[in-house]
Amino acid sequence: MEVYIIGGFLGSGKTTLIMDVATANMDKGLKVAILVNDVGSIGVDGATFESKGLSATVLPNGCICCSLVGDLRKALTSIRDEVAPDLLIIEPTGLALSSKVRETVAPFASSVKVVGLADIKRHKVFMKKKRRFYLEQLAGSDVVFINKCDAADEGGCEAAAEELRESLGDVPVIPISLKTGAGMERVMEELAS
Amino acid sequence: MRKSESADMAGGVAAGVKGKVLNYNSDTQMRLDKALLAVAEWIEAEAGMFLGHAKMCVSDGGEGITVNLVDLGTGPERHGILSPRRSADFAFMVAATDIDAHELEHEIFHALEDSGAFLELEGDHHHHHHHGCDDPSHGEDCDCGGHHHHDHSHGV
Ligand SMILES: Nc1nc2c(ncn2[C@@H]2O[C@H](COP(=O)(O)OP(=O)(O)O)[C@@H](O)[C@H]2O)c(=O)[nH]1
Ligand SMILES: [Mg+2]
């Protein structure tokens, strides 16, 4: 099975992106599974996926980049052996480091794609106040999408993209809007590549 | 990386509750949205800014409404609809940086209590709940952002 890991800070649009990507791949006839891990013991995203007709495996109460590594392995084993999807999409918590999740997932997957999702509405404040965590969370992604560009002023998203390219090195950084659908072809292209 | 280095960087915590909402209708949803807003506004006052995600899902048999609050300027954003019904499943959680997890938990309980919505929360001990702060599962070399887990479902 192929695996996508959709990382990024709390509220950046991970769940929204996953619903779009899952639906698009299911429309192509692929079998898609979703694995989600909310911060803390109470999850909301699992119910959100379910209420949109998508079934998701929920890993509650912990974080799959550290304390839940064992649980994550178990879930990956059972999804691979029992569900056997063509594609598994993983949403780690908004505080997780995707690069850690990749290490655990790699042995289970035919290929792993790590997506970093940034939020243009909070990009400036993150660069100022949470710079290290923000960059560390996006680091190690195969591609970074700056989301919510519908809400940015002219040129704001491109400037932020340039800033992230400088900080993250050799990673494509692409402005998108999951709300308007701007950049979605690029999203699908990057994921399929 | 040293222990909790990224915990210092992110400083994130989370708290939440789940259970049932009774006599659910559009007025109930409005009350719940207000509770979400109240918690986020408290965080902004407390931390200087709201950097996080407050969200809830009210659902029943494959239908449901999700409300997200990430940006106080935008306010609560609703996705989906749920028609009025006697009872529905309810989950409400807030994750944010630069606040105390215990206080966050109390704020959530107060906001929901003040909302006037009819809620049956799991492990609701009306503030007599004890807090399990030292999550033993949160390992020594955790790099997850230093969030603590506050489990309200501690054996009612
Ligand atoms: N303006 C705007 N809001 C968006 C966009 N994408 C997602 N959102 C909103 O951001 C909020 C958080 O999204 P969610 O997918 O739950 O974020 P997650 O915490 O990363 O999973 C929701 O209210 C979304 O509707 C976008 O492109 N533009
Ligand atoms: Mg999510």
Image: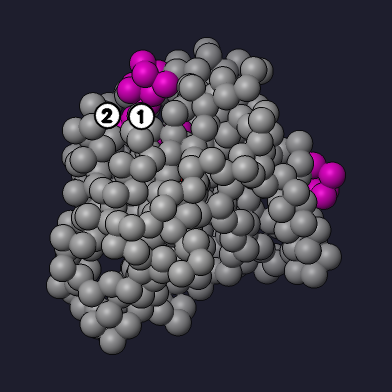
**Vertical side of A24 occupied by B140: above or below:** above
Residue at x-position 26% and y-position 37%: B43
* x and y percentages locating residue A135 in the rendered image: 52, 22
Depth check, front residue: A100 or A135: A100
> Amino acid under label 1?
Asp
Q: Is residue A181 visible?
A: no
CA separation, marks 2 and 1?
6 Å
Quick one: quadrant of the N terminus of chain A? bottom right
From the viewer's side, name the closer residue of A106 and B1.
B1
Residue at (32% x, 44% y) in the render: B104
Magenta segment range? A106-130
- Asked whether the residues under the numbered discs 2 and 1 touch, taking CB atoms below 8 Å apart as contact, a structural biologist would say yes
Measured as percent of width and height from the top left, residue A32 is found at 66, 63
Q: Secondary structure at mark 1?
A: loop
Q: Which residue is mark 2?
A: B47
Image quadrant in which you'd find residue B46: top left
Q: Residue furthest bottom?
A: B86
- Is residue B128 left or right of A67 when viewed as pictured? left
How packed mark 2 is, by other alpha carbons closer than 10 Å (few <14, some 14-19, many 20 or more), is some
Relative to B134, B127 lies left or right: left
Q: In the rendered view, does B22 fall on the left or right side of B3?
A: left
Please identify the quadrant where the C terminus of chain A is shown: top right
Residue tagged by mark 1?
B98
Residue A169 magenta-highlighted? no
